[in-house]
Image: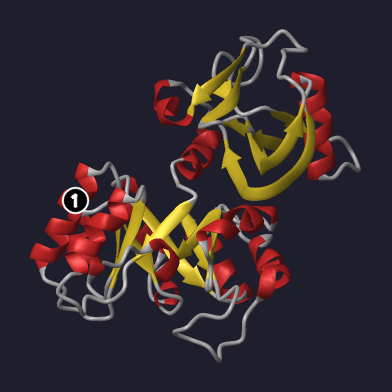
């Protein structure tokens, strides 16, 4: 079986992403793909990306960060995709090799057929820039604040509680509100698996990633559920890679009011860990909305947080 390495670009513009259609005579011909191409001998993935995107679609990539590493086995070949999120580019996209190009609304991607190796990219593009985490349910206006947070535009929210006995009625009410605002609900509670059918996914603590096995993760993902986790070091990230999770948090980037004495990573430390991950990474810990662009410069898919992304009455 042959093996190739490919550099792939996620190039976005105003809620759209650039796609190219493969020529019929190519491997996986007739399917849509994210632009890119094979690495030449001695070439780095980033250099290959810049060369291929210039040759294929006439764009100059000025800044890009690796966000995914995908190994996929087809019947006739094995491909390793180095997937980059393009932060900044210059030029106007045009077809230099006769392939069809389109800027497609990210919300419409499920209407297009892609090679199976692109599945993880499509999953990543469904993840938003901002990921809100709820505080513990300790106030009477918590549910009102949950709704206001969704009203603010949050489309992915994690119900986080250390208490095992979160009432089912609370989960159902949260899910109903998420459906009303076209948002997705992720559970981070001790007995999350009991309520998996009610929500869009679960989030694992850095301890629980060592207590769960690959078969369990696979079964959850086969139900089209999202599985993420919190990671704090290289060992955690390697475990998350082995479990093939859909996303991770890396923290703490900066000091937080809840953990003022914790040793922080800083942006350089965050980037070092992010580069080892094979899935999208959210920066967590002391984040503010305005820092999302900076976070992406260091390889983050976006930012996650409680205080900055939770609306209090």
Q: Residue furthest bottom?
A: 261
Quadrant containing the N terminus is: top right
The picture quadrant where one finds residue 17 is top right
Label 1 secondary element: helix
Q: Nearer the viewer, residue 58 or 139?
A: 139
Quadrant of the rendered image containing residue 71: top right
Locate residue 217 relative to residue 94 in the image: left or right: left
Residue matched to label 1? 177
Judged from this view, the residue extending furthest toward the left is 169
Q: Is residue 126 above or below residue 252?
A: above
Q: Determine which quarter of the picture holds residue 309.
A: bottom left
Measuring from the top left, give residue 162's x and y in whole percent: 28, 80
The residue sitting at 60% across, 33% down in the picture is: 12
On screen, residue 147 above or below 84? below
Query: How many numbered badges does the structure rendering display?
Result: 1
In this rendered view, identify the residue nearer to me: 210 or 231: 231
Residue 141 at x, y = what percent? 17, 70
In the image: residue 6, left or right of residue 165: right
Q: Give the farthest residue toward the front.
A: 313
Q: Quadrant of the C terminus?
A: bottom left
Residue 121 shows in the view: yes
Q: What residue is at 54 percent from the left and 31 percent from the top? A: 14
What colouring method underlies this structural image? secondary structure
Query: How far across and down, in percent of the image, does residue 86 sit?
Result: 68, 40
Q: Please name the residue shown 59% across and 23% down the image.
A: 19
The relative height of residue 56 versus residue 241 in the rendered view (above or below) is above
Tell me the residue at 61%/29% (across/down).
34
Q: Position of residue 27 (x, y in %)?
A: 63, 20
**Horizontal relation, residue 243 to residue 43: left or right:** left
Residue 1 makes an appearance in the image: no
Q: Answer few, some or many: residues within 10 Å of disc 1's Cα (few below 14, many 20 plus, some between 14 and 19).
A: some
């Amino acid at each position: 079986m042959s093996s190739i390495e490919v550099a792939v670009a996620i190039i976005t513009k105003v809620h759209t992403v650039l796609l190219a259609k493969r020529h019929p005579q190519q491997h996986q011909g007739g399917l849509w793909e994210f632009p890119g191409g094979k690495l030449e001998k001695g070439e780095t993935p980033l250099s290959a990306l810049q060369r291929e995107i210039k040759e294929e679609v006439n764009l100059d990539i000025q800044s890009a960060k690796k966000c995914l590493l995908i190994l996929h086995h087809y019947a006739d070949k094995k491909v390793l995709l180095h997937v980059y999120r393009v932060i900044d580019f210059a030029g106007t996209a045009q077809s230099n090799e006769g392939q069809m190009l389109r800027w497609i609304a990210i919300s419409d991607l499920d209407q297009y057929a892609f090679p199976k190796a692109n599945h993880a990219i499509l999953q990543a593009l469904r993840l938003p820039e901002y990921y809100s985490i709820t505080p513990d349910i300790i106030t009477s206006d918590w549910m009102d604040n949950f709704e206001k947070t969704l009203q603010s535009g949050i489309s992915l929210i994690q119900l986080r509680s250390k208490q095992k006995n979160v009432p089912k009625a609370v989960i159902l009410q949260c899910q109903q509100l998420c459906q009303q605002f076209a948002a997705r609900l992720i559970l981070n509670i001790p007995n999350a698996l009991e309520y998996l059918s009610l929500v869009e996914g679960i989030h694992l603590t850095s301890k629980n990633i060592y207590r769960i096995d690959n078969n369990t993760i696979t079964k959850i993902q086969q139900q089209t559920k999202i599985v993420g986790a919190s990671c704090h070091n290289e060992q955690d990230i390697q475990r998350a890679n082995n479990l093939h999770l859909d996303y991770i948090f890396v923290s703490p980037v900066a000091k937080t009011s809840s953990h003022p004495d914790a040793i922080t990573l800083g942006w350089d430390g965050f980037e070092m860990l992010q580069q080892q991950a094979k899935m999208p990474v959210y920066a967590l810990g002391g984040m503010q909305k305005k820092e999302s662009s900076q976070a992406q410069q260091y390889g983050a898919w976006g930012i996650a947080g409680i205080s900055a992304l939770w609306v209090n009455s």
